[in-house]
Every structure is written in C-alpha cells, then in structure tokens.
Amino acid sequence: MYSIDRAYVDGRFVRPHGQERMELVSPTTGDAIGEVVLGDETDAVQAVLAATAAAPAFAATGRAERLDLLERLHASVMARSAELRDATIEEYGGPLARSTWVSRVAAQTFLDAAATLRDYEFERIAGRSRLVMEPVGVSTLITPWNSAAGSICGKLAMALAAGCTTIIKPSELSALQSDIVARAIHDAGLPPGVVNMVHGRGSVLGGVLCTHPGVARISFTGSTATGKAIAAMANESVKRVSLGLGGKSPTLLLDDADLDTAIPGAIVAAFQNSGQACIAGTRLLVPQALLAEVLARVRSAVGQMAVGDPADPRTQIGPMVSAGHFERVQRYIRRGVEEGATLLVGGPGRPDGLARGFFVRPTVFADVRNDMEIAREEIFGPVLCILAYRSEDEAVQIANDTPYGLHGYVFSSDPARADAIARRLQVGRVAINGMQHDPLAPFGGFKQSGVGREYGVQGLESFLETKIIMEPPNERSAS
Ligand code: NAD
C-alpha cells in the first residue's frame, strides 16, 4: 500500500499540517492501493512563503544557469520514467503505450523549454526604448489528473525557464504520479524554495494559492468550471492567469478524405487516452453522402476496440479515473439515449467480462444533433457523437457552434482545402490528416477552452512581464 504523507516545501519533504487522509483507489480493480495526506491552508501558506523567499535570487539567475537546471530536471525525471509509467497505469489506468509515452513527454518538456530559452531575447529595442522581459514572480501551477506528470512538468519547465519560483498543486487524484515528480525534482538539486508541491483539495488550497499577495501568476489546467472560479479569485488582486480548459472538439471529414486513413485517425482522435483527453475529437462531422459507409466502418472499428487491463499491451481503452467519473460518463451515455440519438456501438453499463473497475463501453452515437447535451458538453470518456452535414459551410458552422474552441481535426486529400477549413475553425490548434506532437508550438484554446498559451515562445512569455526603459530625452527628440 502506498502512503503519500509529505509535501515538498523549501527543498525538503515535510509532513503536511493538514490531517485529511484520502484513499487512493485503483481504477482497474476499484480496490484501495494506499492513501494520501492532504495539505491545508497552512501548508499552502508555507509553500507560498518558501517560493517568495527564493524568488529574488532565482529571478537573478542567468540563461546558462537555468539551462543547466532544466537539463538536470530532464535527466532526473527521465531516470524515473519507468516508475512514472507504472504509476500512470496503476493510479490512472492509462494504457501501457500511452503511459510510456506520457512519462517520457513529461521529461522532454524540460528540454523543450530549454530549446525555447536558448534563443529567446530577453532584451530588445521597442521604438526608442529598451524592452526588458522580467520574471513575473511567484507562480501557482494547478494541474488536472488526466495528464498529471506532463502537465506539472510542462508548466514547471516554462516557469523555471522564465526565472519564476513555483508552487505546484496537483490533482488529488494524481498523488502517486505527482510524488514521483516531486522526488525527481528533489534529486535535480534545485535551490530550496524554487519548486514547492502541496497535495490537497482545490477547494481547500485554492483560496490561498489563488489570492495570496505573494503569488503573481496562476497557470491552471483543468475544467472550464474550475477555471472560471480561479479567474474570479485571482481577479481581486489582478494576478496573471492562464487557463487551459475543456473541449468538445470537432473532426471534419471532408468528402475527398481517404477513409482508410481518416476513419482510424478520427477514432484515435476521439478515443485517445480512453477518451479522457481535453483535445479529444468527440464530434465527428460527416458528409451526408458518405454517412452510411462511415457508420459501417466506425461500428466495426470501435466494436473491436480492446478494453481492459491497462498494463496489457493489447489494451486500447483503460478504465475511467474514478468511480465518480465512471458514473458521470454513464450518465451522459444514458442521456444520449434519452435525447434520441442512435446507439451505434456500446451503450450504458460495463463491457462484457469486466465486472470490477471503472470500465466504460466505448460508445458511438449516430443521428446526433448539435443542440443535444451529448454534443455540447464535455463528457471526457470514450463517447463519440456522429453528426451529418450537407455542405462545407454547414460543417464549419456546426464545428464552431460550441462554447469550446480547443482543437479541431480535418481529414481531406486536398491540402489546400484542408488548410482553408482549418483557418475557418475557431480553435487553438488544428490537426490535418492525423495527430502529431509539436511541443515547441504554443498550445491553448479559443472561447471557453482557455486563456493564454502554453509551450513555445508564447508559453515562456506567459511567465514574463514586459518592462520598457525609456532613453533620456535628447535635444532633438525634446524639440
Ligand atoms: P478540475 O477542474 O476538476 O481540477 C483541476 C485542478 O484544479 C485539480 O488540481 C483540482 O484540485 C483543482 N481545483 C479544483 N477546484 C479548485 C479551486 N476552487 N481552486 C483551486 N484549484 C482547484 O479538472 P480535472 O477533472 O482534474 O481535469 C479534467 C479537465 O481538465 C477536463 O475538463 C479537461 O478538458 C481539462 N484539461 C484541459 C487541458 C488543456 O490544456 N486545455 C489539458 C488537460 C485537461
């Protein structure tokens, strides 16, 4: 049994002041696998004070020192990537291939931030003045459970590249993965107080971490509802806030798409990470003329998906992260039936042969209208909605008719046509004919999918303030 009874504050692992013990549950079996002691407001304040004390010296570090630190963090997280992979499988139910990939991506974020930092110009000329980019200050990093280590490391890497000290508040559902990251951070030998981590509930720690006068910046990734609450708290003292929020991303299958690649691509887009992905392409828009063929192909492919033990290399869909989330996804599947959508594959209940754990049947609804709840709300599970369209204009209109705007997918055999459609989508990122990982490009959402960008130069600048130092007036400019 695991016991996570420590916070990481001021360079040391300390017993939290908080006393609440929360059970850690395996999503694969539903059995308890350990517990985490959750921090309270006192722990949050201690972490903010440690980060505040460390901030001036860390802000004064130069590029070379920060590059060295990022490289040490990469090596240190990489050294624990197998441990991280196993925790991602055990605590989160991430399928083996995905868990292996995400644990390496977590380490890689430090090298990606280093690559951005290496070429970044902190001082430039603007008009007749000097523009100086300075660290924004102590930064609270709040992360979700669905990409725990990647999200923690991605935020941390950019904050450190910019010269900001940090407090990490991981999801209470990711204690094992987060604790491994904390130990890797400790092994990297950073100055005390530069990175702090407190486990705990958002409702308990959030008040301190989002309002404390010592905190200058909040980088949040999670649901849109929580993002709004955090923005409201941070607003009081005008903290710098970036929000990476939910999505209901469209996949536009154009009538010239090669279905042999487009259908598997659209299915990966929808069911990646067992459907627990912010960027999941959960609304598949299909030209009316191709509908019958697409439905037949999707039914066959999704019907054969392997659901089960995430440690088994053949598994494509693992369990939902928690009993509560399992129930939520079940509610949406039942809702889709009530709303009159047609169940093409899957449906309510558990997959055959999986009596334990939080497994959901991979489900596809046809005859979906875009005003149905299942088409408007983020389900965050293996549930795909198929909607038919009659013209390209209608496809774009349906795609953009959503409060979200995180991601889009376009499948077409004509690159110019795909590009033209991509430009019309109100989303932060579009993948054409399949997904690729591009960690040096900024990532974030339009509309209620977020504010600001992570990664790349814009990600680095989100942890910087712009200062202008004006030249003294000379006789010519004064006259
Ligand atoms: P969540 O909003 O429930 O929780 C996210 C984090 O916020 C957790 O650490 C939680 O403890 C904390 N939190 C909750 N209430 C808080 C409060 N009042 N103050 C401060 N912190 C608080 O989200 P989740 O269920 O962990 O994650 C899933 C959601 O995250 C989905 O909506 C998904 O789309 C989104 N997500 C977005 C991105 C992106 O980059 N856009 C990436 C991954 C996940």
Image: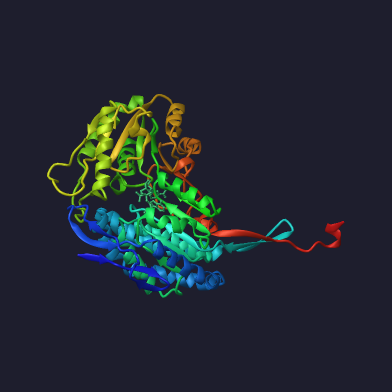
Above-or-below relation of 167 to 335:
below
Residue pictured at 36% horizontal, 53% vertical? 144
Q: Quadrant of residue 4?
A: bottom left
Residue pictured at 28% horizontal, 31% vertical? 336
Q: Is there any visible trace of residue 83 in the rendered image?
A: yes
Above-or-below relation of 106 to 414:
below
Q: Nearer the viewer, residue 220 or 455?
A: 220
Q: Nearer the viewer, residue 347 or 136?
A: 136
Q: Is there any visible trace of residue 111 in the rendered image?
A: no
Of the 4 image quadrants, the one containing the N terminus is: bottom left
Q: Nearer the viewer, residue 29 or 437?
A: 29
Above-or-below relation of 361 to 158:
above
Colour theme: rainbow
Of the 4 image quadrants, the one containing the C terminus is: bottom right
Residue 417: image location, x then y, percent: 47, 35
Position of 451 compared to 178: left or right? Answer: right
Q: How many marks can you see?
A: 0
Residue 73: image location, x then y, percent: 41, 69
Residue 134: image location, x then y, percent: 59, 63
Residue 180: image location, x then y, percent: 32, 66
Residue pictured at 45% horizontal, 45% vertical? 228
Q: Quadrant of residue 250?
A: top left
